[in-house]
Image: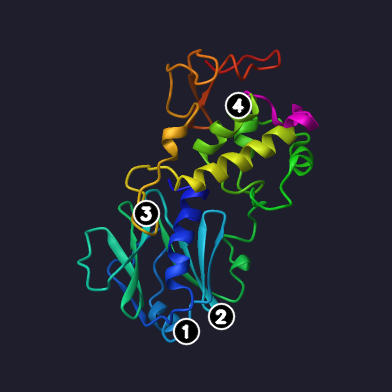
Amino acid sequence: MPELPEVETTRRGIAPVLTGRVASGCVVRNPRLRQPVPEDLAGCIAGRPLEAVERRAKYLLLRFGAGSVIVHLGMSGSLRVVEPAAPPGAHDHVDLLFGDTALRLRDPRRFGLVLWHEGAPQAHPLLARLGIEPLSDAFDGRWLFEALRGVRAPVKLAIMDAHRVVGVGNIYASESLFRARIHPATPAGELSRPRCERLAQAIRETLTDAIAAGGSTLRDFVGGDGRAGYFQQQYFVYGRDGEPCRVCGGPIRKAVMGQRSTYWCPRCQPLRRAAKAPR
C-alpha cells in the first residue's frame, strides 16, 4: 500500500506541473472505487484553477478554491501526469483534465478514492479525526511521550494508529523502531522520555530518507512522474527475515503483530521486559 513517503513523492511530482492550471473537466471510465466517484465531478472542477496540491496523511488534496478533490491511492494505485490522448490501460479509471495535460488514476484493486468536498478538506469525515503529522514541527519526543502514556499496546501498533500519528505504515514503523533500537513488542506506555525522543527522531529521519529515495516500490507503485522509488534498497529489517543485520550481523527475525508482518534484530533491539517476545 502506498504510505506517506509514496504519497508525498506523488504530491511533489505533480504539484509543479499542475498547480495554477485550469481544470477543463474529467473522464471517469469506472466510478466504482471504494466509494463511487461523484457523478458531477467534471462540473465541480471545470473552469477552476488548481490552487495547490497538498497532502494530509495518505490523502492527496487538490484544492480548487471553494472545494477540493480528495484522492486516496488505495492498496496499489498511482497518479501519473500524462497526455489526455494517451491510451488508457484496463485499470486507468479516472482522468482529471487540464487542457493538454491529464492526471490519471490507475488503481488495479479499486480500493482508492476520488471525492469532491466543498469547503476545508480537513473537515471531511475521512480526515477530521486523523492524528499528528510526523514531519510537522509539533511532532517530537515530548509529544510522543505524552501521547503514549498509559498505552499498553505494543509500540509498533501504537505508532501505526492513524488517530495518533498519521502515515507511519508497516514498513516505516519497523524501520523506525530499528533505528531507535526499540523492540516492536515493547508496551508503548513503558517507553521513557529519552527513548521517545529517539523514536520520534527515527520516525522523522526514516520518512525523510524514504521521500528522498522516491518511496518504496510496492507492487506497481510509481510516483507522479512515472518513476519507481528505491527506498527498499535501504531497508535495515523489513522483508529481511533470516538475513544478517546490517549493523551487528545477527539474523533478522519476523513475527506477525496486529495481522502485519513485523521485522526486528534481536541483538540491536532487545526486549527490555519480562513478557515473552513474539517468536
Residue placed under numbered mark 4 in the picture: 184
Q: Would residue 188 be counted in the magenta stretch?
A: yes
Distance, label 3 to label 2, CA atoms, is 26 Å
- Is tag 1's residue or tag 3's residue first in the polypeptide sequence? 1
Question: The magenta stretch spans which residues?
Answer: 183-195
Residue at the image position 42 percent from the left and 55 percent from the top: 73
Q: How is the image coloured?
A: rainbow
- Is tag 3's residue or tag 2's residue first in the polypeptide sequence? 2
**In what element is the residue under mark 4?**
loop
Query: Looking at the picture, how far across and down is residue 3, in whole percent?
Result: 49, 47
Closer to us: 35 or 139: 139
Q: CB of mark 2 within 8 Å of CB of mark 4?
A: no
Residue 131, compared with residue 149, is above or below; it is below
Distance, label 1 to label 4, CA atoms, is 47 Å
Identify residue type, mark 1. Answer: Arg
**In what element is the residue under mark 3?**
loop
How crowded pointer 4 is (Cα within 10 Å; few <14, some 14-19, many 20+) is rated as: many
In the image: residue 207, left or right of residue 7: right
Identify residue type, mark 3. Answer: Gly
Identify residue type, mark 2. Answer: Gly
Residue at the image position 43 percent from the left and 64 percent from the top: 14
Residue placed under numbered mark 3 in the picture: 77
Q: Which mark is residue 48?
A: 1
Q: Which mark is residue 204?
A: none
